[in-house]
Amino acid sequence: MANTFDRRQWLKTAGMAGAFSLFGGATALANPYETSPLRVVRNNAPNGNIRLSANENPFGPSKKVREAMMNGFDEMCRYPYAFIREMSDIIAKKHGVTPEHVVLTAGSGEGLKAAGLTYGLHGGEIVAALPTFLALMDYAQQFGAYVHYVPVDEQLGHDLDAMEKRLTGNTRLVFVCNPNNPTGTILSASKMKNFCENLAKRTVVFADEAYFDYITEPNYPSMVELVKAGLNVIVSRTFSKVYGMAGIRMGYMIARPDIARRLRENTMAQVSVPALLAAKAALEDDEFYRFSLQKNAEALQFLYKKLDEAGLSYVKSHANFVFFKSGKDIRELNTLMAAKNIYVGRPFPPLNDWCRVSTGRMEEMQAFAKALSEVV
């Protein structure tokens, strides 16, 4: 299964392979996912534009995922209860927890919102970095939560000391997106672990690990280890990124059973049979997992090279996007790039002269680089 695969060691090899392909070795890296009859090559934005704005994996879903969904149509007349139990068992085994620790969600977005509702209701306070992924905080504020936003540091990473200082007696949750979206930064393993351990004694810590598969640091720990130790920690994961299933909506949270029960009660949707069948197939498809990591590594190296040539500052990424300083207000840049049929990331205040661009197919990367050179 993909969870047992050493993605970091493999990514080091993929990085070299990616560099090789940039200098004419692409044939050696040919893969059936680029030529499969099931893979319909198409631009994924309106009017044939190229969308590099939502951190999607354009190579997915994999062939095995598609076949699992197609072959499962006879089960679509059934409610998903039995499939939910099976997937909870699979996820529990993957992470070394019990099924009672697992909360299945319609994408990790539903999990974020359920947590925002659970801990933000009736004036609960939440601490989070800025910029970061705002789904949890935005939803919590709709139900009366107050959010203490702490600016990222000079390296665009979480300022953990400043975040800890913002805790009050009414702080119900601290949100840490690691790797962070949109900056692509990660905390050192020891800092992340110590921060979560210490703050979990005072409140609940939510670790958003949507981009965990892309981390290349050796032996980087998931905060699921703290959940297994019984701490007040929630971890969220998604099938939207490396597995290429953003449109299928499948994610999950791992938390202590009593916390998981509260979160489960506040979920708003129920995962569907197609999503559950797709997720099971995705976890069994090591080939596509490796392929997705390789293609992402190649695209990152290409983007770094082009941004260096353009003299633009950027952050080395542990995700499937790059955050760079364009020098233009992002709204202006969006307009200029859209005029060239390319969509890039939305505003992430207060860093409004920075732009997040997702990785994509190499032809999309080349089109982005050409357009950027013309507008910046």
Image (tube, helix red, strand yellow):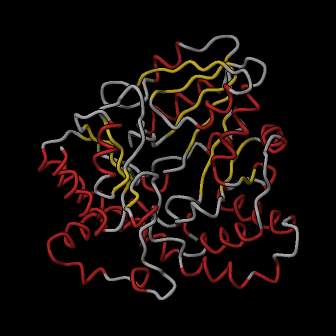
Q: Quadrant of the N terminus?
A: bottom right
Res 360 → quadrant: bottom left
Vertical position of residue 288 compared to residue 28: above or below: above
Report x, y in % for residue 279.
65, 67
Q: Which residue is situated farthest in the bottom direction here?
A: 37
Q: Is residue 221 visible?
A: yes
Where residue 369 sits, quadrant-wise, is bottom left
Rendered residue at 55%/76% (across/down): 285
> In the depicted view, which residue is nearer to us: 9 or 299?
299
Report the residue at 35% width, 50% height from top: 357
Q: Is residue 222 above or below residue 41?
A: above
Q: Position of residue 25 (x, y in %)?
A: 19, 78
- State the image coordinates of residue 330 (x, y, percent, origin top left): 33, 37
Residue 179 coordinates in the image, percent (x, y): 45, 43
Position of residue 53 relative to residue 18, above or below, is above
Query: How many labels, in total?
Result: 0
Q: Is 362 left or right of 268, judged from the image as shown? A: left
Rendered residue at 60%/20% (across/down) = 147
Please identify the quadrant where the C terminus is shown: top left
Q: Which residue shows up at 82% across the image and 38% down it?
A: 262
Q: Is residue 256 left or right of residue 313?
A: right
The correct choice, above or below, for 29 with respect to 275 in the image is below
Q: Is residue 70 left or right of residue 355?
A: right
Q: Is residue 23 left or right of residue 238?
A: left
Residue 216 seen from this side? no
Residue 112 versus residue 2: which sits nearer the camera?
A: 112
